[in-house]
Image (spheres, helix red, strand yellow):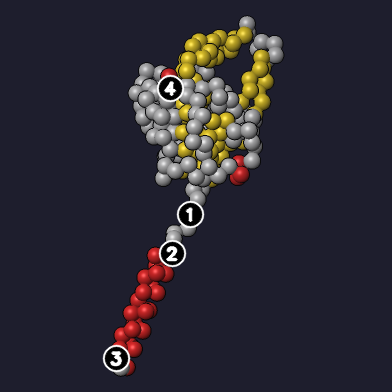
């Protein structure tokens, strides 16, 4: 009889332990907030960046950027392009949120992403004013407002909206710009905080 009770007791403990293991769930691991500091002062070239690597990507130029899949976002002074639409074969697009509270944004929208198309881009500033040409870019990611007062004088105004960027691979990053100046007060050096969700979900 004692052996029967002992066996039943052991079986009960086993069932309880299995139940506890099944009920245990791994806590959600939130991705870290990172900061990127780039150089985009040159009107003659774009600076390309990958959220996956957290760094700028060398070797990309106007002849090959549409064929490259290793970049997500690029800067050309205050202009921005994403790897999608008219700018590339990727899945990139952007949603501009009506909030400046970075921490309150915990999930990327499911839809509404705007992709690149051909727009007027300033390629030089002369005494007579800006020189423009058509290039693929994204006007929705309008992080820096540029205004010409009287040539060659102009002003920049930083926008602090939170932007949700869908990357070239179809993953998501939330982005907020903090300054367009470097430590010496020189323009244009885009600095932004971002959270990149590497697992492909829309949760931050």
Disc 1 crowd rating (10 Å Cα; few below 14, some 14-19, many 20+) is: few
N-term-proximal mark, 4 vs 2: 2
N-term-proximal mark, 3 vs 2: 3
Reading the image, the residue beneath label 3 is 3
Identify the residue at image location x=59%, y=28%: 143
Identify the residue at image location x=41%, y=45%: 199
Res 52 seen here:
yes
Contact (Cβ within 8 Å) of mark 2 with mark 1: no
Residue 60 falls in image quadrant:
top left
Q: Nearer the viewer, mark 3 or mark 1?
A: 3
**Res. 85 mark:** 4
Residue 129 falls in image quadrant:
top right
Reading the image, the residue beneath label 1 is 28
Instruction: State the separation of the CA atoms marked 1 and 4.
Output: 33 Å
Res 183 seen here:
no
Residue 95 location (% of width, % of height): 54, 30
Instruction: State the separation of the CA atoms marked 4 and 3.
Output: 73 Å
**Res. 24 mark:** 2
169 up-or-down from 78: above or below: below
N-term-proximal mark, 1 vs 4: 1
Q: Nearer the viewer, mark 4 or mark 2?
A: 2
**Res. 144 mark:** none
Instruction: State the separation of the CA atoms marked 3 and 2.
Output: 32 Å
Of 87 and 164, the residue lying toward us:
164
Residue 24 falls in image quadrant:
bottom left
Identify the residue at image location x=51%, y=14%: 119
Left or right: 131 as drawn, with respect to 65? right
């Amino acid at each position: 009889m004692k052996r029967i009770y002992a066996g039943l007791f052991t079986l009960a403990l086993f069932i309880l332990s299995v139940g506890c293991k099944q009920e245990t769930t791994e806590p959600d691991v939130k991705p870290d907030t990172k900061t990127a500091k780039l150089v985009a002062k040159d009107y003659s070239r774009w600076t390309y960046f990958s959220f996956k690597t957290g760094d700028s990507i060398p070797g990309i130029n106007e002849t090959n950027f549409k064929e490259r899949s290793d970049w997500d976002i690029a800067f050309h002074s205050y202009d921005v392009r994403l790897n999608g639409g008219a700018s590339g074969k990727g899945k990139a697009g952007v949603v501009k949120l009506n909030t400046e509270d970075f921490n309150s944004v915990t999930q990327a929208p499911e839809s509404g992403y705007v992709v690149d198309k051909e727009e007027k881009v300033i390629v030089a500033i002369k005494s007579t004013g800006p020189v423009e040409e058509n290039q693929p870019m994204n006007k929705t990611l309008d992080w820096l407002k540029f205004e010409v007062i009287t040539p060659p004088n102009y002003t920049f105004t930083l926008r602090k909206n939170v932007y949700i960027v869908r990357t070239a691979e179809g993953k998501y990053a939330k982005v907020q710009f903090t300054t367009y100046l470097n430590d010496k007060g020189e323009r244009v050096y885009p600095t932004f905080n971002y959270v990149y969700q590497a697992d492909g979900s829309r949760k931050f």
